[in-house]
Amino acid sequence: MRPDALPASWFVPLFASALLAQSPATRPPDPRLQQIVQRALAELDQPERARDGLRTLENLGAKGVPFLIEVLQWQQRDRTSPQVKNQVVYVLGRLGADALPALPELRAFLRNDADELGRQSMWALTMLAPHLDADQLLAVHDDLRRSPRSHTTLTMKNVLGNAIALAQQPTLTGLLQALSTYDTTAAAASRWLLAHPTAHAEHRTELLAALVNLLQRGAVRDPVRWRGAMQGGFANGDAAEAWLRLSGEPLGVLTARALLDHWQPDQRRAAIAWMADHGRTLPFRERADLVARLWDSDTGLQVAAAEALGRYGRAGLVALPGLRLLCAGPDERTRAAASRAAVAILADCSTLPATDVAWLTAIDATLGGAVGTAPAAKCSPAGLEAMTEILWLAQWNDAPTLARVLSLVEHAGPVRDDTMQAVFGWLVHDDAAVVDHACAWLARRGPAACRAFTAGLDGGDNEALRRLVRWSMPMADERTSLELLAHLTVAEATTGEQRRDLLDDENSRIVGRGLASMLADARDALPPATQRLRQLTRPVDRPVVVLRVGKWDDGLRLDVDLSPLVRTLAAVALADLELEIEPTPGLDDVVRRTLGVSLAELPRHVADLRAANRLPALLDHVEDQCRLALGVPPHLRWPTFGGVVR
C-alpha cells in the first residue's frame, strides 16, 4: 500500500514514533558531544577564550541545542554565570531555525527579565521570528507587550515588533517598503531576508537595489558632525550582510563600512581586514569609520583596527587622537599596537614641509599629555588640511588637552572651513567641558563659522543650526550651546532688516546679543526699530530663555531671567538715538544695577561713552552679565565688541 493510500488515522502514531525515535531526549546523550559542549561552555566564561567557545557551539548547530536549553532552564540558572547565559542566548539567535526548540526559554526571559539576559533574548527572538508560525508569532507578540519597560530596550523592542509584523505577512511590497525606511523596520526586513535568502527569487534585483539604497543612505558622512560609533544607523550591518548573502558578491566599500558596525565580531573583523587593504584611499570622513573600532568590545579587534590604521600612514591622521588615548589604556596589547600605529602615521608625514611636521608633532605631543611648542613659522595649506583630519575625531580627549590643541590650530594659520566643520562635530559629544570649549572657539570665528556651517550642510542655515542645538546636543551643554547660537545667529544677520528681526526673536539671549551688536557697529539699523525698543524696556511677565524649532515644538525653556539686561540695552539704544525713555516700572532700578547710573543720567552717560569710543566696553560688560545669568562657564574666551578675546 502506498503512503498516500494509508488511512489518515495511521499518520499520528507513525509520526509520533518517528519523532520519538529521533528525539535526543529519548536516548542517552553522546558522551563525546556532551564533552565538546561542556568545554565550549567553560570557554564562554573566559574572556580570552569566549570567541572559540561561541564558534564551537555555533558549528554544532541543532545537535547542541538540547544542551543549551538545559543551561537556560530555571533550575540551572543559579549554577551558570550571567555571562555564559547571555552568550548561550546569543548562540541560539545565531542558529535561527535550528534553535526553535528553545523558544519557551527565550519567551520566559522576554517576559521576566529586564536585565541584560532579557535584552539578549529579545535580540535572539528577532532572529527566530522569520521562522515562527502564526501562533508562535502571536504568542511572542503578547510576551513583548507584557515585557518589562526599559528605555535601554526601546530600540530592540521596536525591531522585534517589526520582525513579528513582517514575518506575519512577508510580501515583496512589505519588504521593499520596510527597506525604504530606516533603523528598526529596515533591520527587521534585512534579518528576514537573511533567514530566507531564496524567497522572492524572481524579484532579487529589486531587493538588492533596495538594500543598496539603504546602505548608501547610511554611508553619507555630514561634514559638520560625526554620528557616533554606529555611523550608518542600526540597520546598516544587517543590510550589508543581507546584500552579501543575496548577491553572492565579495566585500566592497559600502558593505565593508557597514559591517564595521555589525553586532557579530567576525563580521567586524572581516570589515577591518577589508579597510586595512583598501581604506587608505577613501575620503577621511569615511576612513574615520574604522577609528570607532579602536573602542570595540573585542580587544583583538581594537588591536586589528590600530594595526590597520598604522598601515594607512599619513592617511591615518584622523585616528591620531584616538590612538594617543589608547596609548594610556589598560590593555598592554592595545597600548603597544596604538603606539606603533601613531609612530607610523607621523613617520609617513615626513614628506610634508618641515614646518608642517613641526606643527603636527606639537599637536601630537599635546594629545599625548605633553606641552606642544608652537613653531614660529605658519603652517602650509597641506599642513592645515592635515590638522583638520586630526580634529575630526579629537573630541574624546579631555577638555584641557583640546583647549591647548585648538590654541595651536588658531596660531598655525588661517582657520579653514573644514576645520570649523570638524569642531562643529564636537557639539554632539557628551562631555560638557569639551562642548563648552568648542562653542567658545566657534563663536570666536564669527561669520566665518556661519559660512562653514552653511557649506557643511546642504541647505544649512540658521534654522539648521537651531536644530543642531535643540535636538542633537546633550542637555548638560544647553547653556553654552545657546550662547553659541546667539553669537552665530547675530553674526549671520548682515542687513538692517535682518538685524531688526533679531529683536522679535523668542530667545531673549538672541534679542540681547542683537541689540548689543547693533549698538556696536550697526547703529543705522536702530531708528526703524524704535517702537520695538520701547516695548523691550517694559517688564516681562514670564522671563525665560526659549529655543523653539518649528511650530510643533514645545520649546527648550531655561528658567533664566535676562529681561533686566535686555531692558537696559533697549534703554541704552533709545538714549543713543537721543529719544525719550519712558520710565516703565522697575526700569530705573535695573539700569542702576546693571550700569551704576540712574535712568535720568543714562542719556549723558551714553553720549560720553560714545564720544570717547568706550561704548563697546559697556556692551561687553552687559554681555558678561548675560553669560553669568545663563551659567556659562566663566573661563571660556568669547569675542568682545572691544576687539579682543578674553
Image: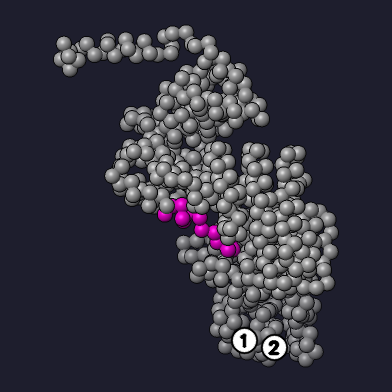
Q: CA distance from mark 1 to mark 2?
A: 10 Å
Q: Where residue 240 sits in the image (x, y, percent)? A: 46, 46
Q: Where residue 569 sits in the image (x, y, percent)? A: 68, 79
Residue tagged by mark 2? 576
- For the C terminus, the image quarter is bottom right
In terms of image quadrants, where is residue 36?
top right
Q: Where residue 443 sits in the image (x, y, percent)? A: 68, 70
Any part of residue 635 in sight: no
Residue 44 highlighted magenta (yes or no): no
628 or 142: nearer the eye? Answer: 142
In terms of image quadrants, where is residue 128?
top left
User: Residue placed at 50% from the left, 55% from the top?
Assistant: 219
Q: Residues within 10 Å of mark 1 (few under 14, many from 20)?
A: many
Position of 266 with respect to 621 (left or right) is left
Q: Residues within 10 Å of mark 2 (few under 14, many from 20)?
A: many
Amino acid at dot 1:
Leu
User: Residue placed at 66% from the left, 30% from the top?
Assistant: 48
Above or below residue 193? Residue 140 is above
Determine the secondary structure under disc 1: loop
Residue contact at pointers 1 and 2, CB within 8 angstroms: yes
Amino acid at dot 2:
Asp
Above or below residue 490? Residue 10 is above
Position of 352 with respect to 219 (left or right) is right
Residue tagged by mark 1? 526
Badge 1 or badge 2: first in the primary sequence: 1
Determine the secondary structure under disc 2: helix
Color scheme of the displayed model = one colour
482 or 574: nearer the eye? Answer: 482
636 or 408: nearer the eye? Answer: 408
Q: Where residue 461 sits in the image (x, y, percent)? A: 54, 71
**What residue span does the magenta drawing correspond to?**
213-225
